[in-house]
Amino acid sequence: MAAAAGTAFAIVEWRQSRPVLPVRLFADARFATVNAASVLLGFGANGAFTLLSLYSGRRVWGPCFTRRWDAV
């Protein structure tokens, strides 16, 4: 789904006279490499933070499920 949306976005932007993101910028190898690296690093960081929060050993509950320990 994301690949189809990205392709559709690129096709629509390619045909515009004043695009939001000029697709021709990706013809430059340095620009394309830096953008691909930032996307990969962003996905990696988000995945790492998700896994760290899941397996940190701490359970984080919302305010509706907290227990007041001083009321015991």
Image: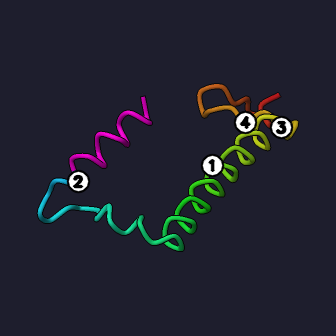
Q: Residue at x 72, y 36 (%)?
A: 60
Q: In the image, 40: left or right of 70?
A: left
At 75% from the left edge and 47% from the top edge, which residue is drawn?
48
Instruction: Give the quarter of the figure containing the N terminus.
Output: top left
Q: Which badge, 4 or 1, is on the more N-terminal residue?
A: 1
Q: Which residue is mark 1?
A: 43
Query: In the image, what residue occupies the spot 23% across and 55% down?
Result: 14
Foreground: disc 2 or disc 4: 2
Q: Residues within 10 Å of mark 2 (few under 14, many from 20)?
A: some
Q: Nearer the viewer, residue 14 or 52?
A: 14
Name of the residue lying farthest toward the right: 57
The segment highlighted magenta reads 1-12
- Per the model, the C-alpha gap separating discs 3 and 1 is 23 Å
Between circles 2 and 3, the one closer to the viewer is 2
Q: Nearer the viewer, residue 28 or 21?
A: 28
In three-dimensional space, the C-alpha distance between marks 4 and 1, rounded to whole angstroms, equals 23 Å
User: Label 1 neighbourhood size at 10 Å, few (<14), some (14-19), many (20+)?
Assistant: few
Label 1 or label 2, whichever comes before in sequence order: 2
Q: Give the distance between the C-alpha atoms of the residues marked 3 and 4, in whole angstroms.
A: 6 Å
Q: Which residue is mark 3?
A: 58
Badge 1 vs badge 2, beta-carbon distance below 8 Å: no
